[in-house]
Image: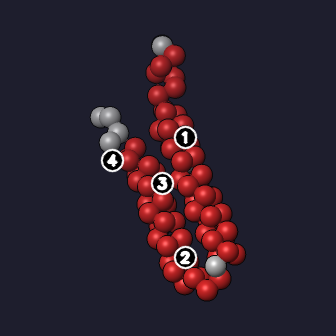
Amino acid sequence: MSVLAEVSGNVTAIGYGLAAIGPGIGVGIIFGQGVQAIARQPEAYPLIRQNMLLGFVLTEALALLGLVAPFIFQAL
């Protein structure tokens, strides 16, 4: 039995774990910069909040695609 055969069952979990780092960092940057922007211009709160939520949704969509992709493209 080769080492590759022993690891193959966990490759998707490791891959998703690594893929989740990007959206995690992205969400942190989006909300951090959004709070900073609201603190600088409180009168622009509705527009900043709308853009923050849109960025959050798009970033989380990428994370969900990373979760679903191994199930769709699994080797037969």
Q: Disc 4 to disc 1, how far (Cα)?
A: 18 Å
Is residue 47 something that shows in the picture? Answer: yes
Residue displayed at 57% across by 46% down: 21
User: Could you say which disc has been placed on residue 48 in the image?
Assistant: 2
* Foreground tag (1 vs 2): 2
Answer yes or no: do the residues labelled 2 and 4 have beta carbons within 8 Å? no
Q: Could you tell me which secondary element the residue under label 3 belongs to?
A: helix
Question: Compared with residue 2, is residue 76 higher up or lower down, i.e. above or below?
Answer: below
Disc nearer the start of the sequence (1/3): 1
Q: Amino acid at mark 1?
A: Leu
Residue at the farthest top position = 1
User: Could you say which disc has been placed on residue 72 in the image?
Assistant: 4
Disc nearer the start of the sequence (1/2): 1
Residue displayed at 40% across by 44% down: 70
Q: Amino acid at mark 3?
A: Ala
Q: Could you tell me which secondary element the residue under label 1 belongs to?
A: helix
Q: Could you tell me which secondary element the residue under label 2 belongs to?
A: helix
Is residue 64 something that shows in the picture? Answer: no
Disc nearer the start of the sequence (3/4): 3
Q: Disc 1 to disc 2, how far (Cα)?
A: 30 Å
Residue displayed at 46% across by 21% down: 5
Q: Disc 3 to disc 4, how far (Cα)?
A: 15 Å
- 10 Å crowding of disc 4: few (<14), some (14-19), many (20+): few
Answer yes or no: do the residues labelled 1 and 2 have beta carbons within 8 Å? no
* Foreground tag (2 vs 4): 2
Residue at the farthest right position = 39
* Foreground tag (4 vs 1): 1
Residue at numbered disc 1: 18
Residue displayed at 32% across by 42% down: 73
Q: Amino acid at mark 2?
A: Ile
Residue at numbered disc 3: 63
- 10 Å crowding of disc 2: few (<14), some (14-19), many (20+): some
